[in-house]
Image: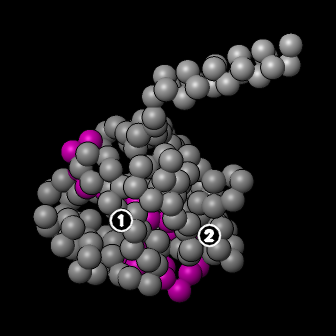
């Protein structure tokens, strides 16, 4: 009896594995910093730079470079999506309203900012699970090492590459990718 149940379960799991549609970047949804639903399908046809941000980090001045990059290329099918996260030394302690005010007042941020999420650990947000797990993104496994790590998504929703926190948003790797 145990053998029949085991064989049945294996068969069911095998069928589910082949019939379940893989999740793509465009299947994901999140919430904006203003509390509105945001569907990544709205970004089809655009190159997307996903960045985890923090207001009290040594890399926080990168907001200025991110904003310049966004303004320069936003009309060329490019968008930046910021995700505030408090995962590294509690460098993003504020509420969504606090973060929005900080970004607007200090850096004039106009690129889309999402609500504060977790980018690692058991409570990792779905977008970062997709970004960091090869079984989901089809490209590579990675881990978010610090604030302002940048993920490059092409206009077809494919993960292209990662740029470390210490690289500025206007580094050669990102500029040449956007310009292709």
Q: SS of the residue at dot 1?
A: strand
Picture quarter with the C terminus: bottom left
Is 169 above or below relative to 158? below
Is 145 above or below relative to 30? below
Viewer-nearest of labels 1 and 2?
1
Q: Is residue 52 magenta?
A: yes
Disc 1 crowd, CA 10 A, few/some/many (<14, 14-19, 20+):
some
Disc on res. 41:
none
Query: Taking the image as drawn, is residue 51 in sight?
Result: yes
Q: SS of the residue at dot 2?
A: loop
Q: Locate residue 131, reporting x and y percent.
A: 47, 55
**Which residue lies under the disc numbered 1?**
161
Reading the chain from its start, which is encountered first: label 1 or label 2? 2
Is 23 above or below relative to 59? above
- Do residues under tags 1 and 2 come within 8 Å of each other at their CB atoms? no
Picture quarter with the N terminus: top right
Q: Residue at x 46, y 78 (%)?
A: 165
Check the image and tell me how it is coloured: one colour
Q: Locate residue 34, reporting x and y percent.
A: 50, 47
**Which residue lies under the disc numbered 2?**
92
Foreground residue, 138 or 106? Answer: 138
Q: Is residue 142 magenta?
A: no
Segment colored magenta:
44-64
């Amino acid at each position: 009896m145990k053998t029949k149940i085991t064989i049945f379960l294996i068969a069911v799991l095998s069928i589910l594995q082949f019939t379940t549609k893989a999740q793509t970047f465009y299947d994901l949804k999140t919430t904006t910093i203003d509390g509105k639903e945001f569907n990544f399908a709205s970004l089809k046809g655009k190159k997307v730079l996903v960045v985890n941000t923090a207001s009290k980090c040594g890399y926080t001045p990168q907001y200025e470079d991110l904003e310049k990059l966004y303004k320069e290329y936003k009309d060329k099918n490019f968008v930046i999506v910021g995700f505030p996260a408090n995962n590294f030394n509690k460098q993003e302690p504020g509420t969504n309203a606090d973060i929005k005010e900080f970004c607007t007042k200090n850096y004039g941020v106009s690129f889309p900012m999402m609500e504060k999420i977790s980018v690692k650990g058991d409570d990792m947000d779905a977008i970062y699970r997709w970004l960091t797990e090869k079984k989901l993104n089809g490209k590579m496994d990675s881990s978010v090492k610090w604030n302002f790590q940048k993920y490059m998504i092409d206009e077809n929703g494919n993960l292209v590459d990662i740029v470390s926190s210490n690289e500025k948003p206007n580094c050669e790797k990102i500029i040449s990718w956007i310009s292709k």
